[in-house]
Amino acid sequence: MRTASPAAMEIVKATAPALEKHGVEITTAMYARLLQDPEIAAMFDRAAQESGEQPRRLAGAILAYAKNIDKLQNLGSAVQRMVARHVETGVRPEHYPHVAAALLPAIREVLGAEVATDDVLAAWGEAYWMLADILIAAETQAYDEASAA
């Protein structure tokens, strides 16, 4: 399982104020990119997208992750809810690169290259894949348990 370096964790934590201010704008831009893929778009609740609920929910989750990246135990119940939702909607490991490819450019688009520098995006890349690996492992276990039942 990948982990983010201490330096990356510090950078991610330092972006929390920008995420608090611009998180919904970032997640809205991310979903605009991500949902261009019809297969991925079909996995999402269109009403939650159109109402802005899904971008708000994800922005809150990203902010909580940024603030707690060095204290992941604080996110246990939120991760469990995310895993359950991902399993319910059929998220698989092959979907995670699509999200990364939508999220990281959205961060730069919204915050600008002066704030979302290459170092910031690299740190968020490390952080993203650390969380993705946690989710993928938990989702794999959930899928395995469901198929064994």
Image (spheres, helix red, strand yellow):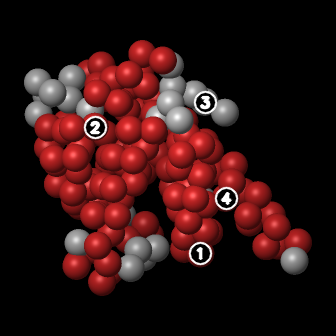
Mark 2 and mark 3: span between their CA atoms? 22 Å
Give amino acid for label 1: Glu
In this rendered view, identify the residue nearer to me: 104 or 36: 104
What is the quadrant of the C terminus in the image?
bottom right
Q: Nearer the viewer, mark 2 or mark 4?
A: 2
Residue 37 at x, y percent in the picture: 36, 64
Amino acid at the residue labelled 2? Ala
Q: Could you say which disc has been placed on residue 16 in the image?
A: 2
Among all residues in the image, which is located at the extreme right? 148
Q: Nearer the viewer, mark 1 or mark 2?
A: 2
Task: Say if mark 3 contacts mark 1, CB within 8 Å.
Answer: no
Pointer 4 or 1: first along the chain = 1
Which quarter of the figure is the N terminus placed in?
top right
Badge 4 amino acid? Glu
Q: CA distance from mark 3 to mark 1?
A: 25 Å
Q: Earlier in the sequence, mark 2 or mark 4?
A: 2
Q: Secondary structure at mark 1?
A: helix
Label 1 and label 2: CA atoms lie apart by 29 Å
Dot 2 or dot 3: first in sequence order is 3
Q: Quadrant of residue 85?
A: bottom right
In primary-sequence order, the first of circles 1 and 2 is 2
Residue beneath label 1, please? Answer: 88
Q: Is residue 33 visible?
A: no
Can you name the residue that lies furthest to the top here? 7
| Mark 4 element type | helix
Q: Residue at x 20, y 29 (%)?
A: 116
Q: Which residue is mark 4?
A: 139
Q: Give the residue displayed 22% in from the left and 79% down from the top.
A: 51
Question: In which image quadrant can residue 109 be found?
Answer: top left
